[in-house]
Every structure is written in structure tokens, then in C-alpha cells.
Amino acid sequence: MFAFEKMGLGKLNATVNAWSPEDARWYGFRNWSLRELQTQDDSVRLHSLSKGIRSALVSVGVRTAYAPNVTAMSAVIANPEDMTKKILLERTELYRNAEFPADGVFIGPGQAFVASTSGCPLIIATAGEHMIVAHAGRDSLIERNAVLGKPSRRHVSVVYAIIEELLKKGESLNEIVMCMMFSVPAESFDHHPMHPEYGTYNRELIKMIDMLWDGSTVRKNGCVFLDLESVFVNQAREIGVRCAWAIHSLREFPALAHTRDGKDPSRRNLFVVKRNV
């Protein structure tokens, strides 16, 4: 387990904890995937997973946590009341909603955001007394349909969605602070333009990134590598947020899984972000 305590973000601070697939084995299951844990009945069926999540939350003093449905990479930010399915893990409450795709959620003091990922980074954003934590996979940061010339969601990027939601709260751009953590290392995130299956998409993706967020791709030996950290910072600054940075890529934590590490791609990490104040 890796812990970062009392990270300062504007007026607020957060504690960030990460558990690896190996940590999951201590509780008798293979990885931390939350996909099948959607209801109270699921918590009984997935007893070992539920016990592991409860222990993780209790270890950082969390009684209320939100785990939005991030699978769709929707670039939507939820409110706590959107998370309508309560899963009681003894005295800890985990809220989900499989029918409401969302990458992120507002969290209050003492509450936490929970996600299981494998290379998709997290964004923690604050402004004034508000905090949003969000999943920020590639398709969350860059809408797949927009790459193909057919945008279908409100925001091309979850970064834009986060900023809009904070502005709706009456905060100013100057108050917004954004931090990305746990990105797949750029040097591992190759998007070969001549890939036999994904080449057409990769070429359009590369073209879009180079046009809109220059400096977020790296070319080496005929391949193109995508730097999600750079995409994130460029997008935030494009809108006018100057206090945006990325830290702690997964290259620093070889025990944490990502889909390009050459190991079992089904492995998942567990991330818990607790708002302290």
C-alpha cells in the first residue's frame, strides 16, 4: 500500500492511498475490480472483495465513500445524491450507481472517492470549499467519438467538465487547483500509427493531440507515445487554470498495475482519495 497524507490543494487537503493487486491477495481475491460490486447482494456474494474494501476504507478513517461508474469514460461529474445505491460494509457506506455513468464526483469533508483502475490516472481538483475527484483515462481526457469526427458528449475531456462544475459553484478560474496522479508512464503508452487493428484510430488521435495539445506526444523508432500528464496540463491551461500539475506516474510504483506493463491485463489497483477538510 502506498500513502500520501495531507496533500495540499488550494484551501483543502486530501489523503491518497493506493493498493496493488498483490495487496488484494492478502484478502483472498485476485484484484480490486469493482465492476461486479454494485448492490448490497453483491457484497455478500463477493465477500472477500467487500472485506478488503472495507478494511481499506477503515484504515484511512472513511465512513462514507463514492465509487462512480467510470467504465464508460463519460466525462461526467456526479453529485453525491446521484450515487443512489448504498452498500453497507459493516459501519462503512459505499455509494454506487451502475445506471449513472460518471468519471468523477464531488466529495465532502471526511468522505472519499474510490476507484479500481489499471493505468488510468486520477484528478483531484479544488476551488474554495469544493473538491472533485475523478477518473481520467485516455477516453475520459479525449473523447473517442470526437477523435473520429463525431463528438457525442457534452465535454471532449473530463478536465473541461471538472472546471465547468467548479465554476457553476461560483468559484473563479484563479481559485481552481488541479492535480493528476498515477498515470500510465508515457514511455509505455504507445499508439503505433500503423497498428494492424488500431492504426486508423491512432493516426486520428495523434493528429488531434498534436493540433490541440502540442507537446503531448513523443515519437521514437517509428512509434508515437501518448503523455496523459501533458494532455491534462495542456487542457487545464487552455481553459485558464494555471495551477495544474501531474505527479507520481506509475513508473514510480512497479507494484501497481497498468495494462501496458506486460502482465495480466485484468489486474486492477484500488485507489482511495479522502478529503480531510
Image (cartoon, grey):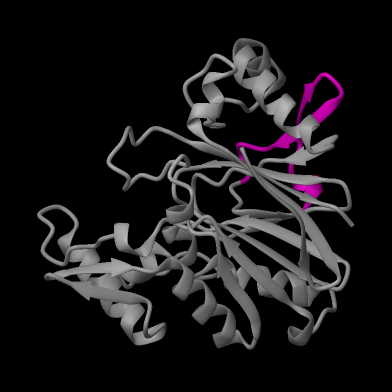
Which image quarter: residue 225? Answer: bottom left
**Rendered location of residue 71, percent (x, y):** 50, 44
Q: Where 16 falls versus 264 (above or below)? A: below
Left or right: where 106 falls relative to 231: right
Q: Where 144 falls versus 17 (above or below)? A: below
Residue 13 colored in magenta in the image: no
Is 208 in front, or is 12? 12
Residue 99 colored in magenta in the image: yes
**Rendered location of residue 21, percent (x, y):** 49, 31
Q: Where 122 falls versus 127 (above or below)? A: above
Is 241 in front, or is 148? 241
* Magenta-drawn segment: 79-100
Q: Where 56 falls versus 271 (above or below)? A: above
Residue found 55% across the figure and 87% down from its top = 238
The reply to whether residue 150 is visible in this rendering is: no
Residue found 10% across the figure and 64% down from its top = 194
